[in-house]
Image (spheres, rainbow, N blue to C red):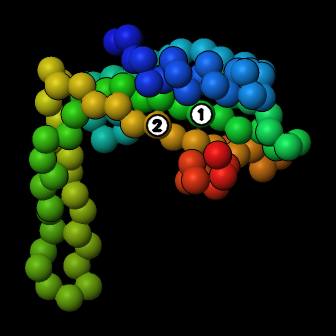
Amino acid sequence: MQDDKAWDRITDAIETKFGIEDHGRSKRPLEDDQDLTEHVSFIIFEREGERYKLERVQGPAIIDRKTMGARRAGAVIRTQNVYDPDEVSFRTNLYRHDGVEWEAIEPSALGL
């Protein structure tokens, strides 16, 4: 996985302020293109009695989105992403554990 200074600063700050319960790295195929993979780094921490998971996802960049479907009322329209496997993009996802599963939330919900 590419060296990511921003991710390192974020994880260091969380570790200092809250402590890290678990961490790891994995690979997974893209949902809409099983031939391409993305690399995921994650940390799990607890804040004010609630568990959070922060993910940093590195994968192929989306270079285009194609819209497919009929142009009539009631027709289903879907989009297909076109990826550049040589260009890398990053995204950060934040989840809160609701006791059963991880629920995606906006990072601003932490109020940090």
The residue under the point 42% across, 17% down is 5
- Name which residue lies at 51% across and 40% down: 93
Residue 111 pos. (x, y %):
66, 52
User: Rounded to the nearest whole Å, what is the CA distance between mark 2 and mark 1?
Assistant: 7 Å
The answer to whether any part of residue 23 appears in the image is yes
Q: Is residue 41 visible?
A: no
Of callouts 2 and 1, the N-terminal one: 1
Secondary structure, mark 1, is strand
- In the image: residue 98, left or right of residue 111: right
Q: Is residue 52 above or below residue 7?
A: below
Q: Position of residue 14 (x, y in %)?
A: 67, 27
Q: 23 above or below 66? A: above
Residues packed near mark 1 inside 10 Å, few (<14), some (14 to 19) or many (20 plus): many
Amino acid on which disc 2 is placed: Thr
In which quarter of the view is residue 72 placed?
A: bottom left
Decide: few, some or many residues near mark 2? Use Cα within 10 Å; few <14, some 14-19, many ≥20.
some
Q: Which residue is more in the foreground, 3 or 55? A: 3
Residue projecting furthest to the bottom: 73
Q: Residue at x 59, y 33 (%)?
A: 54
Residue under label 2, please give it: 92
Q: Amino acid at mark 1?
A: Leu
Q: Position of residue 101 (x, y in %)?
A: 72, 44
Q: Residue furthest right?
A: 49
Q: Where the N terminus falls, by quadrant?
A: top left
Toward which corner of the image does residue 20 lie, by quadrant? top right
Q: Residue 8, percent across and down?
A: 51, 18
Numbered tag placed on residue 54 in the rendering: 1
Left or right placement of residue 57 versus residue 20 in this view? left
* In contact (CB < 8 Å): disc 2 and disc 1: yes
Q: Residue at x 34, y 12 (%)?
A: 2
